Amino acid sequence: MRVVLLNERRAERDAMLRALQDASCSVEPLSDPKATLDAVSREAPQIIVVSVPPTGGPELVSRIRGADPSGQAYLVVVLERTSSGHEVSTLLAAGAHDFLRRPVSDFELVERVKAPARLLRWARSIVKPTAFLEEGRVVNVGRLAVWKNMGSIVAGELGQLVGEPLQASPGWPKRFSGRDLRGATIPMSLASEQVELRISILVDEATLAWLGGALLGDQNAGDAAMNDVLRELANTAAGAVKRAALPENVTLTTGIPFSDHTSRESGEGIRCWCVTCARTNAELAIVGEIRGRENQRIPASSLREGMVLAHDLRSESGALLVTAGSRLTSTTATRLAQMLGPRFVIEVAYAA
Amino acid sequence: MSAKILVIDDSLMVRQQVGRALTGAGFTVLEACDGVDALQKLAGSTDTRLIVCDVNMPRMNGIEFLERLSADRSAVPVVMLTTEGQPELIQRAKALGAKGWIVKPFKPEMLVAAAKKLTVVAA
């Protein structure tokens, strides 16, 4: 591995140099930032290890990232023992990938430098959809309490939003059969299981008018406003489910809600609840779906806003390994572009 | 003059609900639909006293927006208003300088109380 090492403290730099060379790294040791920028620009190293100064650390990290011609170098910063969490987060936000605190341990330094190779092996190991990542724990989503109780969890939360008590019972609302429905769906991802959960909220015209009155003060609000209401209801439902999942040690990642009027009364991995407001006779259908999801390798140019992705992973073929982790925003896409370098083309299409 | 509060949420419904609660308590409300829009609105308005910000938004989410404010050393206090509740996310927002975290659906009186407290402190 080609490593550029910046450290103004000679004794510490020499010790780090020896440790890295003993680990078969080719190291260019440097003592000043300008020479480091030149070396990074000239050598395109795989790893950069930088001892950051007491002030101006984030700026130095940004300049080094900018000097890297491939944009692919893995950057480790060395901090003081007493550096705060805020300092660490600022350096990570500026473009550092990892950090070490003083006194620098030779063993820790070598392991940090090996981290990108470990991540790549990990990425390759999860190609099978049955792979699990969280400390060997396998989650059967269908057995989770949050899945079994989704109807009442969502009903309770939506009741708070609309200011009326709502009751959930299993099954599809009978009066919805044969009617035109409006609705919204929100995708949620369980990273460790390569599983996507979807929550849909469907209503008929009568219930939609009631929601418009309760939430917008206008029973006859236009389509755009009503669709916004339905998407926010789906977002609220997802928030309730995510919080309810935490005690089961399950962390769900949310995508962007989208308008969806597809009626789904039954099917594999589908559960329905009828949510009722006794005072107004309004009814909503809550549909939960479990969708198995194999890892997908997609071209960077096919990225769409709202996708859930593992932004630290990259394949060698110019495609991103899309699993789970965070939702794609254009800001994230810009960071990805910086990280991946010019070989990748990233375009993001905005949701309407 | 009433204190100006910037409300950032991609949902028009939520912006309206928050706006009603805050204007009813005497605040002036400026709206933005995501972090990018909010940065533009902040650049054109130097007297913003508080920011109420969602987390999940297109283009630039609430955490990314906090990172930008932190990098710019903004002194405007931020309260997050979101359906999210993961402790890691709350800690991340706190580390980036967020002063409060309110989970939706919110109680208007709770939001107004937070706004009054933070705009007094920031005055």
Image (cartoon, rainbow, N blue to C red):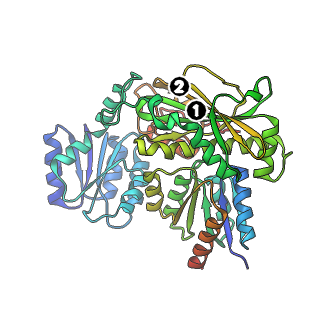
The amino acid type found where label 1 is placed reads Arg
What's the residue type where badge 2 is placed? Answer: Arg
SS at circle 2: strand
Percent of width and height locating residue A142? 47, 28
The residue pinned by badge 1 equals A198
Is there any visible trace of residue A292 in the rendered image?
Answer: yes
- Say which quarter of the image contains residue A50: bottom left
Q: Quick check: B62 above or below A278?
A: below
Q: Residue furthest top?
A: A267
How many C-alpha atoms fall within 10 Å of the one at disc 1: few (<14), some, or many (≥20)?
many
Compare marks 2 and 1 and give the one earlier in the sequence.
1
Looking at the image, which residue is at 46% across and 61% down?
Answer: B94
Residue A69 spot, x, y in % from top left: 41, 41
Tags 2 and 1 touching, CB below 8 Å: yes
Residue A291 — which label? 2
Q: Is residue A321 left or right of residue A185?
A: left
